[in-house]
Image: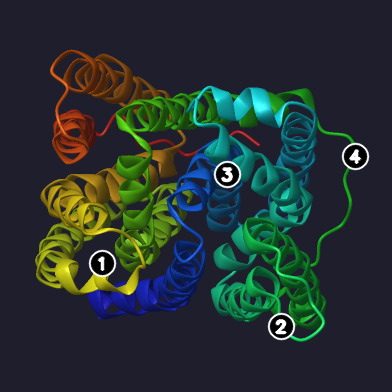
Amino acid sequence: MEKKEFYDHIKKIALPITVQSLLQAALSLIDQIMIGHLGSASIAGVGLAAKFISLFSVTMTAIVTVAGIMIAQYKGSGSKEGINSSFFCNLYFSLSVAVLFILLSLLLPTQIIRLYTGDAETIGQAVIYLRIMAAGFIPQTITLMLSALLRNMDSAKFATIASGISAVTNTVLNYLFIYGVGKLPQMDVAGAALATSVSRVIELAIILGLYYKIKRQKEIELKFVFGFEKRFIQKIGYVLAPILMCEFLWSLGENVYAVIYGHIGTEACAAMTLTYPIQTLAIGVLSGISASAGIIVGESLGADNNDKAYEQSRSFIKMTVLASVLIGVIISVLAGYYVRLFNVSDETRNVTIYILYAYCLVFCGKVINMVLGGGVLRSGGQTKYIMVIDMIGTWLIGVPLGIVTAYVLKMPIYAVYFILSLEEYVRVVLELHVFRSRRWMRNIAQND
């Protein structure tokens, strides 16, 4: 009976998140196809701008992750005041970070993109895209925080509804703005960015409306808090600082990878960009498992049931391995059909296929890290372990391998990508060692 309740709990949390991720990934694919008709410079420009935007996204993800950890454990301990304080303290910090990224995107876009490539046309397209995308940073931040709250309160479906409507709206607006329909001008890359920013605002409006509709029913009414006890801030800082540093340095590493790919050439960079929708789609399939792992294991830790949390974690790891192998096989079979969707050269298509093959080989390691490192181990708040492991993987293994293979050995992009991505499996080994030690288990909500 307990096992049935466990899997029912997973479905309740994971299914809406997975549907949301898959819908966003599928529509992102449609967006990529639309942009793909604008040429390699536009594809590469959007891809490089997206790499800088990813610095913002992962920083937000880090803060939202901490909010989720805190909310899950305070829910497990039955503290509504702790839930409320966890939400607002993290919200204020995330909004401050959003403002910083907006200023960088508006004031220094050319300087930022020049770090990735020297191609003038690609830089021009990326700058246009980045400046307009910045308009959606604040609504995206608030939406992410509300989504984390709803998921922890067993209301993940409402975040999925908001995200789904936003994703469909984004795709429709992309078509209207990119190509120009009726009296609308053809805006190309600027249209893609504008469509995304407008959809962010729409998503926020929807999720706010849904929150106010169900807040009393779900007992998740928020009350503004502007002052926090020093001990509470220290507790959040203890969890947040390693995650924030970890996610930022990981994303910075990913940006170094983008610089490496940009050095190889515009066509190679375009091929890599074409794989992003498939990568997002594949990760999206298992994103629900990762999110539910953090919530469910966190609740057990908050209730001081470590043995239950450990067994739940083992089940999550087994599910992840089986699902990742199956998904990797499917991608490898469909890779040749996927590249035919884009209006690019045969060379770019072939390189894209090889990159996807490489991705299939490292996919299992990627998602184990997502579920074990990003979900299970972080649920106990001992985020310093993941910070150290990620820094070792990215900066001591991935980045050096990328530099050597691209700049010294001058390997093709798919070989560079595969070799530097082997750091994923190094991280898996280190995370499994920490997991078995049980040192990651901690009840954050105690001592309040």
Whole-angstrom CA distance, mark 4 to mark 3, is 25 Å
* Residue 262 x, y percent position in the rendering: 39, 31
Instruction: Tell me if 95 is positioned left or right of 388 in this view.
Output: right
Whole-angstrom CA distance, mark 1 to mark 4, is 51 Å
Whole-angstrom CA distance, mark 1 to mark 2, is 27 Å
- 227 vs 329, nearest the viewer: 329
Secondary structure under badge 2? loop
Circle 1 sits on which residue?
Answer: 339
Dots 4 and 3: beta carbons under 8 Å? Answer: no
> How many discs mark residues in the rendered view?
4
In the rendered view, would you say 110 is above or below 65? above
Circle 3 sits on which residue?
Answer: 57
Tag nearer the camera, 4 or 3? 3
Instruction: Tell me if 347 is positioned left or right of 387 in this view.
Output: left
Whole-angstrom CA distance, mark 2 to mark 3, is 31 Å
Residue 6 appears in which quarter of the rendering?
Answer: bottom left
Query: Residue at left 14%, top 71%?
Result: 330
Q: Earlier in the sequence, mark 1 or mark 2?
A: 2
Q: Amino acid at mark 4?
A: Phe
Q: Earlier in the sequence, mark 4 or mark 3?
A: 3
